[in-house]
Structure formats: structure tokens, C-alpha cells
Image: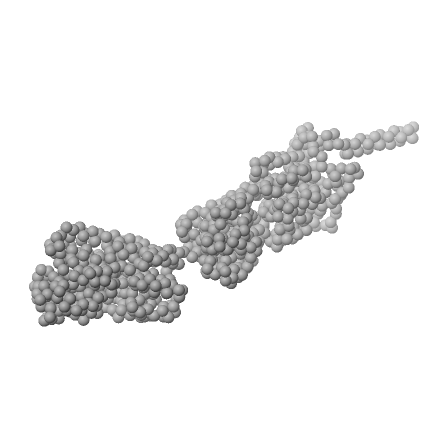
Amino acid sequence: MDRTLTIIILIAAVVAAVVAGAAIFAPPDQQPDQPQTPSQGSGDPHQGNTTSPESHPTLTIVPTVSPTNETPVTTPVPVNTTTPEVTANVTETTPAPSSDWGDSGSDSYTPRYRTVTDMTGEKVRIPYTTHRVVTLYTPAAAMVMAIDGDARRLAGVDRFASIDEGFQTIDPSISEIPVVSGTGIEVNKEAILAVHPDVIIAGSWSKEGLEEIGVPVVSLTTNGFEDVPGALTVIGDVLNKKERADELASYLDDHRSALVEMTAEIPEDDQDNAYITWRSPLHTFAGGDFHSQWAHDAGCRFASEELTGHRQEVNFEQIATWNPDVIILSNSGDPEALLTDPTWQEIEAVKHGKIYRIPRFVGDWGSPVPESILGMEWLANGTYPEIVDLDMVAETQHFYSLFYDYDLSEEEAREIMGPNPAPHVRTVTVTDGAGREVKLELPVERIVTNYPPAVRMVTTLGAADRFVGVDSVTQSQTDQFVCLLHPEIADLTCVGNPRNLNVEAVLELQPDLVLVAGWNRDKLEDLEDKGLTVFGVVAENHDQMKSTMDQLGKALESEDAAADFTEIYQNTLDTATSRVEGLPENQKPKVFLGGCTGISSTAGGEMFQSSLIEAAGGKNVASELAGSHWADVNTEQLLAWNPDIIFLVPYQSTSTPENVMGDPDLQTITAVKNGQVYWFPSRICEWDSPSPQTALGLEWTAKTLHPDLFGDIDVTADADAFYEEFYGTSFTELGGTLPATNFPGNAEAASAQTPMQATV
């Protein structure tokens, strides 16, 4: 009986074993679903442990051999890191279950599979829990590590991720992970199959042909920065870490929004033109590429915007046409090589030493990885420090702590960043009096001139403190308004006089701008050939005066002062011309203006003084004389002209109203006979020469020639207001007075004048 019972028990055991074996090795469609509860881990058929993936166990991958012809599966097994390593061999197959869910008969059950939507919009069915992930290009590997904090789920990576020092610093084990692709396009399918991944994360461009492997493929697109947070979200879904992925994506979105809000304030003309290289200086990226948006978000123009495609090879002539302000080297390249290459010396970026290699740590700060936000901040912060004021060391430390749980020292952060980009070189192009376009770097802080009118123009624009060298005439006039307001000018380096510029002295001063009389274009270009930025000042009529002040206002960033001056000047001109318009010729006095040598020189028709006299309702007797300098005049010519009124300029004049009135050779001249010989205001700043105060000179001349038409004009009050507006003190407070006039009048009034009484 006992023997029979024993046989029965043995037979039952054999039958049970056979049934169990059949269940284990049955074809996929015959395998029963196994109920699972949360305590049993995930519903993934690859799952060989009950440890939650959130606890980050160390995984030992153990290849096993199936007793059938089915493909063996490598199963991740958690190993207790506090005890000697124990490896458990678990053999499983990879059948497709008849259902995506566990046994609904249990109290609770977990899905075996789920669906994620990738960045191409395709719905991809993946295991509920993914333990083994293959990434086919570097940004995907970086994002997996950012979400997980390490490389524990990476079963295969691209070559660059494997060898990158930053990746290895975050998790040294990445160098031991099998390489399954080269650049993301060169994919080794056999290598992928060998690591038995749960899912492949690939760029959308490399997905073709991967479906045949039989492994789910999730596609990413990273055409613009906004795709990086999107890619993080998709990968977070794949890894079942949505909350962590959303945290990182929000960080990127928030920081980008803050940066773009700042850089949006930068006018296009003030933006650096950025040329970004790829592999070599003659390879770059096309417009619409990730790098294009990267540059724009950092506040720069993108030099190669016109190109189409992705990466393009260009020639140097094209780069010279773009003439970038800054060159960014990605992947590789030596800034010093370009800085010393003779071919590149005329490129703006080379001239200013603005060539930089994009920082990298884990990822290239200029590629579609989370670090790209640091790259944009790095470029914008250095280029526009007045607008984007960030502590990039602190930003870098915080980023790597948040994304990779890696604490950088300040020294490490600085080493990663390398040299900060130099501030944007702001430029402006103006047109000088000679019609030349002059490109200036802003701000203009060091000005040199040998031309007195230029000193007055710059002073009127509020920039006299920028002079580092001036002419001898200005320095000798210590009682004129420039030196009264800015006595330090008398002690600056003297660079010559209007007819003779000491070029050596100018070069030693290293000026940002040289202002000279613009009469001789060849001389201007000779000075430019010596490396000087030269602006030719020409203001010999009213339009030239307004234009010159307008262009200097732009050059000196004093546009408001220039606009105020132009308005006052135009109003004065309009008042004068409207009142004298229509006067018959016989009511326009003939005027002689004695020049720098007194009665023996005068202003010809090409000089500013002539246009001033004409606008005030007079006729310049010397209007037919040519030239932009004082013309010599003999007594015979003066007698032939027989002016009705004579004005004498107070500067450098060898004549006075008194000695002209007493000259026996001039007694037949109408002006002398009628006592109409006057000083022209004013001593502290001549109101006749091409300088801003000619607005007052025009008003004074019009009232002197036509007192009946301009009786309501108070020249002294207007002079006080003008000086207050532009110099911060009034004409009267500087001791200014106007000469007494009596046209028509008597000789005694004129002869009683002195230079001191006549002018300030």
C-alpha cells in the first residue's frame, strides 16, 4: 500500500512538473497573464525584482541561456551594495502579452504596458516600467541622466556621450556602457539588440529602420530651444518621472523667458552679429537651426541666417561679407589661431578679440541640451552687461546642482565657462561734412580736435569733458566761454591749429574720434590711413550747421541736445527770414564783415558769415569771393564796395571801431560817414563763425540791420535762455553784454565802443 501510494505521488509530481513546464515555455499566445500588485513591482515582463526604481538600486546585468530556441533576455537584478555582490540568474523571454494589464481578478493590478506620445506626435507602446534605455544621440543621454541623476538606466549610448568628460564626471559608469551609435545617424542595430533595451530614444531623423528591431522607438525633435523642455517632458514620461521632468522643464522655460525679456530691449542695430562655427571656421549652421534661435535669444543677430538646410560649408568671402562682431567656436577650434591668421584680420570679431569657444560640461552649451540655457545666459551676460546682469558662476553652480545633483566649486564653474564674452561693441555710422560715412565705436570717450568751432559744438552737446587734446587757439582764449566753463581744457595736450595738425601728438593720445575742418577730403583720408577715426566738420551754411550738429549728436550719443539745438536754430532762422522776406533790394544794407586781421580781411560767399548776413536781411559785399577762409582785402576794394555797415569780429582782430572810424583813407565809406562800425558779439564765443551760438548771432544781426522789424526781440534774454539750456549758466551771469548799436545812428556811439564793452 505504501509503495502504491508512493508511486501515485511521484506520478502526480511528474505531471505537475510537465504542466508547469508547458506553461513556462508555451508560445506567447498560450501564456497566461499573471496578476500583479504594486507590492510586486511593475508589470514589466522584464522585471526580476520588487525594488521600486525610485530607490535607485545598483543593477548587475546577467545574460542567461534559455533551454529553448527563444532569444535570451538579460535581466536587471538589484544588488545589495552594502554586502558582497550576489548575482541572481533569471531567464525570461520577451513575449507580447495577450493583454496590457495584469489579472483583474486581484484586488489591484498594474498595467504591463502603456502608451507615450513622442515629439513627432506618434503614440508609442512601451513597458510600464523601463529599466533599460538606449539613447542614440547625446542630448537624449544628457536628459535621461538629468531626470534620473545618473546613468543607471542607460543600456546603450552614442559615442560622444560615452567619451564626454562631463558625463563621466557626473557618472563614471557611462564610459562602460556599450556604444550603439556614432552621431545619431550611424546606428548599430546589432549592438542595440545585444543590450536588450526596453525602449530606444532617438532623434526623429534617425528613426527610420529602427522599427524592424522590434523595440519601441520614442522620437525627439530639437529644432529650437523650446523643444528642449518638451524633450525633457517626453523622456520623463518614458522614465515614469513626470514630476521631476516637469520641474526641470519649468526651470528652462522660466529662465529663457526672463532672458528673452531682457534681450528684447536691445535694438537690432546694437546687437552683435554672431557667427557660429561647426568643426572648422568655414563650416557653420543655417538659419532656422537650433543655433540660430540660441543666438537670437542671447540678443545677437545670426550671421548665417540666409543659409538653408542644417550645416553648411562657406568660403571666407562670405564670412567677410557677414563681417561678424563675435565668432563662437563649437565642437572644436582654437580662438588664437583665428586671432593670428592674417586672412581674418579685417573681420570685426578678430579686430576686437571676440572669438570664444562654447563652454561644455555634460553637454555643449550651444547644442540642444539643458545646458543651452547657460550658454545663452553666458553670451548675453558678457555681451550686454548693462542689460543682462547675472552672476554666471552662481547660475552655473545652481544649474548642475539641480539637474545632476553635482556641486561645482566656484573655481570649477569658472573653468567650465572660460573667458567671458567681451561686451558688445556698439557702433554708429554718421555722415560728416565732407559727405563721408564714418563708423564709430561707442561710447566715444576720447576726442581730439584742432578746429575751434568743433570745440564749441561738442561743448554745446554736453561732451566737453571728453576732450583729451585741443587746438592752440581755444587754449589761448582763456576768457572765452569754453575755458570759463571748463578751465581744464587750457591744460590739455595741444595738437596744433586749424591749418596744422600735429599727427604724432594725436596718435599718442589714442583718441576715439578726431574732429578736423572738412575742407580737404584727401587730408581726412590720409589721417584715416594712420588708423584714426576722423570726422570732417563743415558748417558753412545753415543746413550744414544743423546737419553737423545732428550727426555729432549721434556720434556722441547726445541726440536730445542736438535736437533741442536744431529746434532753436530753425525757429530763429524762420523768424528772421519770414520778417525780411520780400524786402526790396534797396532796403537791404550792404555789410562788410572784417575778419581775423580786421579791416584787411573778410568773409567770402562760401563762408558761414555770408549766409548769416543774407538770412538777416543784409547783403554781403564780398559774396563773390570764393574760398572757405578769410580773404585778404585792400583799401581800394573796400572803397569800391562802399558798405552801409561794418562789423568787426572781436577775436584776433587788429582793427577796432575807433581806428576804422579815424582812418583817413576810409572816410568816404558810407558806414564810416554814418558811424555804422560795430564789434560783432561776442568775446567769450564769437557769434559769427560756424558754431552753435550763430543762432544768437543771426538774431542780433537781424535786429541790428532792421530794428523796426525786430523791435520785439530781446537778444540778451534769448542769449541767457540759450546759455542756460546748453551750458547751465546764463550769458549775463558769465558777464556777457551786447555792443551798443545805432543803425541808423551817429558816429559817436560806435567810436565809444571797446572790445570789452562790445562782447562778453
Tell me: 183 left or right of 252.
right
Tell me: 321 left or right of 139.
left
Image quadrant for the C terminus? bottom left
Front-most of residues 542 and 575: 542
Residue 715 seen from this side? no
Front-most of residues 692 and 388: 692
Tag count: 0
Image quadrant for the N terminus? top right
Where residue 6 appears, x then y in whole percent? 89, 31
Q: Which residue is drawn at 18% across and 71% down?
A: 654
Front-most of residues 491 and 49: 491
Report which quarter residue 555 is drawn in.
bottom left
Tell me: 578 left or right of 127.
left
Examine the rendered structure and indicate whether residue 615 appears above or below residue 153.
Answer: below
Where residue 223 appears, x then y in whole percent? 53, 44
Q: Residue at x 29, y 60 (%)?
A: 538
Way the structure is coloured:
one colour
Where residue 238 appears, x then y in whole percent? 61, 40
Tell me: 445 left or right of 194.
left
Front-most of residues 467 and 449: 449
Residue 180 seen from this side? yes
Q: Residue at x 44, y 49 (%)?
A: 263
Examine the rendered structure and indicate whether residue 535 appears above or below residue 658.
Answer: above
Where residue 63 appears, x then y in whole percent? 74, 44
Q: Which residue is drawn at 72% across and 30% down?
A: 29
